[in-house]
Amino acid sequence: MNIDRVYTRTGDDGTTALLGGKRVLKDHARVEAYGCLDEVNTTVGLCRAALMDETTGGKMAASQRKALDARLREIQNRLFDVGSLLSAPDARTAKRLPVPGPEAIAVLETSMDEMNRSLKPLQSFVLPGGSAANAWLHHCRAATRRAERRVITLSRKAWVPPEAVQYLNRLSDWFFVAARFAAAKAKATEHLWEFPLKGKPGS
């Protein structure tokens, strides 16, 4: 791949090219779906920056930071894989593209199991926050859920590889566990949802 110029002027009419050359409007459901993945990927970048910065990553050991950062980098690559799949209008066009299959999902599940071993069982819903890394990981979780919804919307009227839905479903779970793990290892407070609220609003 050789990208020597960012602007092409071909999108000035409000269209963009899918893999294979077919042009569609930029608000097409397929473009919206892989556009959401691009947002997730950029948020993962913010996550990595917060994690590796000692002022925002908390008191996590350097080895734990590096291990989690390496996992996030791998996820960024897999998100590009899913995005390229979604940019293909049909299975024939996508047949030579990398697919995040059962192996990629198994990697996420194994990672979640490992992180969960050091976490306390939850007895309430979690409020994002406590540390910058925790908050950004929760943002990744929410953004991934939105991407998953857009992919499912697309799947009702066009071709979508089932692996895309499966991977995003598991990935959002991974971000949730990783957010808790980052908070725990940084010795940050994990805030839980308090319900019912004590007292009346405004009291």
Image: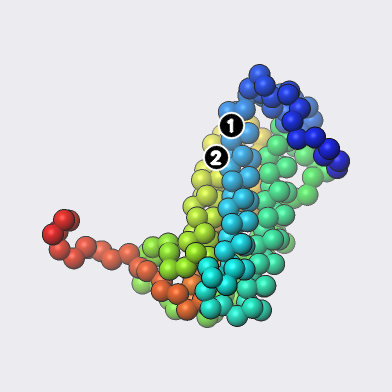
* Callout 1 secondary element: helix
Q: In this view of the protein, can residue 95 be seen by the observer?
A: yes
* The quadrant where residue 17 appears: top right
Residue 31 image position (x, y, % from top left): 63, 33
* Dots 2, 1 in contact, CB < 8 A: yes
Q: Nearer the viewer, residue 35 or 53?
A: 53
Q: Quadrant of the N terminus?
A: top right
Horizontal arrangement in the rendering, residue 172 relative to residue 94 (left or right): left
Residue 155 image position (x, y, % from top left): 59, 37
Q: Nearer the viewer, residue 54 or 100?
A: 54
Horizontal arrangement in the rendering, residue 13 relative to residue 128 (left or right): right
* The quadrant where residue 101 appears: bottom right
Among numbered discs 2 and 1, the one appearing first in the sequence: 1
Q: Residue at the spot x=37%, y=69% of the render?
A: 191
Q: Please tell me the numbered disc located at residue 150.
A: 2
Q: Which residue is mark 1?
A: 29
Q: In this view of the protein, can residue 174 be seen by the observer?
A: no
The Cα atoms of the two marked residues, 2 and 1, are separated by 7 Å
Q: Please tell me the numbered disc located at residue 164.
A: none
* Amino acid of disc 1: Ala
* The quadrant where residue 151 appears: top right
Q: How does the figure colour the protein chain or chains?
A: rainbow
Residue 48 image position (x, y, % from top left): 62, 62
| Crowding near the residue tagged with mark 1, few <14, some 14–19, many ≥20 C-alpha atoms within 10 Å | some
Q: Residue at the spot x=13%, y=59% of the render?
A: 203
| Crowding near the residue tagged with mark 2, few <14, some 14–19, many ≥20 C-alpha atoms within 10 Å | many
Residue 189 image position (x, y, % from top left): 41, 74
